[in-house]
Image (cartoon, rainbow, N blue to C red):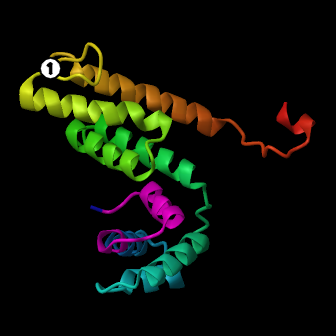
Amino acid sequence: MIPRESRIRLLRERGISRDTEAEECVAWAANMLKLGRDTESVRILSSLAPLFTYDEVARYLGLALEELNIPRVSEQDAVFAYAADELNTMLQGESTEKATLHTLYQVCVEYNCPKPLFPFYLLHFSLTDLDNSGQQHYWPGANRENIHTIIRTAADQYLAAFRRDAAEPRVPPDAPQAARR
């Protein structure tokens, strides 16, 4: 599987700390070449082989993203964009609810459970418990008959909020008062 741009941006902001993450970056760069998005750093990144030096992968990833004019975002924005991509993939039927919730659960653990993602943390455990025992105590009123509707509704709500937030211009806190209107 080729990582999406939101995952690559997240890795750039957080840093690369595992071989699997380095492999994701190399696979992404190889895909960029296939798509005709050829730059020197993309070529170098795509050619790196296992026994990665994480600093080297991170260096060429940053350079490749700059050369491709893919802007930097905050780590929080990268996390939220990655979650949105995962939820879209699930809603389009390209990933299962269980796999998506597990991915978002891992994101929650790694990033101290950002508030907008907390429902998916709870839904991960709700779905797991319902699959295993038919009972759950994480999501009020959830049962085997309605859990999938609850998951999809939560995904739709997150995506609506994500799109709304992405459409709002960001004003720095130290901007003049007139710019805040």
Amino acid carrying mark 1 in the image: Arg
In-image side of 64 versus 95 (left or right): right
Give the residue at the far left of this rendering. 133
Q: Give percent across and percent down for residue 152.
A: 32, 26
Residue 19 among those drawn in magenta: yes
Task: Please name the residue that numbered disc 1 is placed on.
Answer: 144
Left or right position of 107 against 159? left
**Quick check: is 32 in the magenta stretch?**
no
Up the image or down, 53 lies above or below 124; here it is below
* Residue under the point 36% across and 74% down: 22
* Residue, far top: 141
Image check: 106 left or right of 38?
A: left
Residues in magenta, as a range? 2-22
- Judging from the image, what secondary structure is the residue with disc 1 in? loop
Q: Main secondary structure of the magenta part?
A: helix
- Please indicate, yes or no, whether residue 75 appears anywhere in the rendered image: yes
Is disc 1 surrounded by few (<14), some (14 to 19) or many (20+) residues within 10 Å? some
What residue is rendered at 55% in x and 70% in y? 65
Q: Is residue 105 left or right of residue 114?
A: left
Quarter placement of the C terminus:
top right
